[in-house]
Image (cartoon, rainbow, N blue to C red):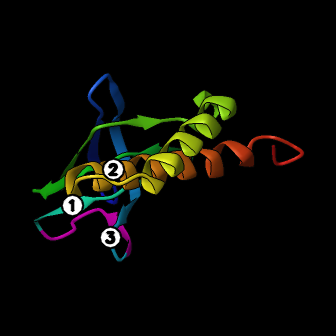
Amino acid sequence: MANTFSLKVIACDRIFFDGRCTQVVLPLHDGEKAIQAHHENMVFAVEIGEIRITDENGKEIMGITGTGFAQIINNRATVLVDTCEYPEEIDIRRAKEAKERAEEQLRQKQSIQEYYRSKASLARAMERLKAGRKDTPTGY
């Protein structure tokens, strides 16, 4: 218990994780950040990517997260993101279609806001495809 901390990962549609863990690795704009017990208090932005949680029993839990924020205060971490899903929940066909739609939207003339939304959609689809392919023997 001394080397664990409380972690809650909340997506807009569910609580992805709520419990004690020894480490969580979060995707950031410039790489990854590993949080362990007794980390200094801070708040930072979470990017689209892979979240890895090592629970108090040593089990590794992996997920694909959308954008959001993380807060660490008094040995408790809260991660608020728009989406978070397990790799086995990813529908590869749907992710491929989303990737193709986002690529097509990026080829069109768009406002700055639409451009950034399309870029975010493409990044989310690419991350979902990458994680989903890890679970299939052929990679597709």
Residue corresponding to mark 2: 1
Nearer mark to the viewer, of 2 and 1? 1
Is residue 6 located in the magenta-colored stretch of the structure? no
User: For residue 45, which numbered disc appears in the image?
Assistant: 1
Q: Image height check: is 124 above or below 87?
A: below
Q: Residue at x 68, y 31 (%)?
A: 93
Label 3 close to label 1 by CB (< 8 Å): yes
Whole-number angstrom distance, CA of label 2 to CA of label 1 = 28 Å
Query: Circle 1 sits in a helix, a strand or a loop, which is it?
Result: strand
Stretch of the chain drawn in magenta: 31-40
Query: Amino acid type of disc 1?
Result: Ala
Whole-number angstrom distance, CA of label 2 to CA of label 3 = 31 Å
Q: Residue 22: x percent and y percent?
A: 40, 56
Instruction: Answer with mark 2 or mark 3, whichever residue precedes in sequence.
Output: 2
Q: Quadrant of the C terminus?
A: top right
Q: Residue 108: x percent and y percent?
A: 42, 52
| Residue farthest to the top, as pictured | 13
Instruction: Answer with mark 3 or mark 1, whichever residue precedes in sequence.
Output: 3
Query: Amino acid type of disc 3?
Result: His
Q: Nearer the viewer, residue 129 or 24?
A: 129
Query: Amino acid type of disc 2?
Result: Met
Whole-number angstrom distance, CA of label 3 to CA of label 1 = 8 Å
Q: Residue 133: x percent and y percent?
A: 73, 46
Is residue 35 located in the magenta-colored stretch of the structure? yes
Label 1 packing within 10 angstroms: few (<14), some (14-19), many (20+) = some
Q: Would you identify the image quadrant in which residue 72 lies?
A: bottom left
User: For residue 29, which numbered disc appears in the image?
Assistant: 3
| Residue farthest to the front, as pictured | 109
